[in-house]
Image: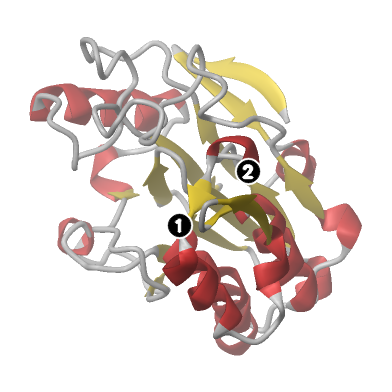
Amino acid sequence: MKPTKAAKVHYLEPELFTAAGISSHGFTTRHEGVSRPPYNSLNLGTTTLDLSHNVEGNRHLLVHAFGGSPERFVAVTQVHGVDLLVIDSPNPDYHHFQRLECDGIITNQPEVMIAVSVADCVPLLLLDPEKRVAAALHGGWKGTAGNISGKAIAAMVELFGSDPARILAAVGPAISPCCYQVDLPVLEAFRSQEGGYERFAAPAGDGKWRLDLSGATVAQLRDAGLVEQNIQVAPHCVSCTPELFFSYRRDNGVTGRQMGFIMLKA
């Protein structure tokens, strides 16, 4: 993914999506916002202890950088689940969506920026260039164990007639196995699901496993029908890259949030 800049916002741009030419999209870094340490500087997370007006200002910076409207920016209340919000009609109550508890958003509406916030979890963007449908998903270990990506693709197929073989996927920066150890209940959550995704947890000793959330996400995308050349994965471990990204584990919970975002063009 290509590091780039729009206005003052530094972000990673998945070239697969850019080539499609129908959306603005990317994964933000921590640079160029207004938040003070330890949330410096482009903190986009409302669940942090950062000043609310700083977070709101940073979100406005993001939306305006891509020619969007703050009134049509949608980020839900994430709860580490697999429920999805579908926006398929013009001019709904966008402010109401902010209070909905779910971990993914799907829309076919142009000029609506949908986004998920993360600080270790996987931010996943999906795009169907033919049907003009986009999705933003938050994949923590619970959402990944529950295959939120597969559920979103199934919803795109059912509701909008998408062909999985034509859907593009961008797996954004997340924590890597080098920095992400989990215990037995997490492993059992993966074992309890079909798909054998517990293979992405490698034993680390002392009752711990190193979990590859991005690897499991890619496997789930393939199992849902996406083709290899339509999947792009960010190479960064957010915990190992403090100069670019927030990380909840690295910073012991006192940190900001970056976002994966996408907005269909008119």
Of all residues, the one furthest to the front in this rendering is: 206
Quarter-of-image position of residue 83: bottom left
Q: Tell me if residue 265 can be seen.
A: yes
Q: List the residue tagged with mark 1.
A: 140
Point 25% across, 15% down: residue: 38
Residue drawn at x 72%, y 38% as measured from the top left? 18
Q: Position of residue 88 (x, y in %)?
A: 42, 74
Between 21 and 222, the residue placed more toward the observer is 222
Q: Is residue 163 left or right of residue 252?
A: right
Is residue 266 something one can see in this rendering?
no
81 relative to 26, above or below? below
Q: Position of residue 34 (x, y in %)?
A: 25, 12
Few, some or many residues within 10 Å of mark 2 (<14, 14–19, 20+): some
Residue 112 x, y percent position in the rendering: 40, 52
Question: Toward which corner of the image does residue 118 lie, by quadrant?
Answer: top left
Which x, y percent locates residue 19? 80, 41
150 to the left or right of 103: right
Disc 2 element: helix
User: Looking at the figure, which quarter contains the N terminus?
Assistant: top right
Q: Is residue 173 above or below residue 226?
A: above
Along the line of sight, the residue nearer the viewer: 171 or 17: 171
Hey, what amino acid is under mark 2? Pro
Q: Is residue 109 left or right of residue 218?
A: left
Q: Which amino acid, mark 1?
A: Gly
Establish if 198 lies above or below 55. Answer: below
Residue denoted by label 2: 177
Mark closer to the chain start, 1 or 2: 1
Residue drawn at point x = 48 percent, y = 67 percent: 184
Against 198, residue 113 (above or below) is above
Question: Label 1 crowding class (10 Å Cα cut-off): few <14, some 14-19, many 20+?
Answer: many
Camera-nearest residue between 99 and 235: 235
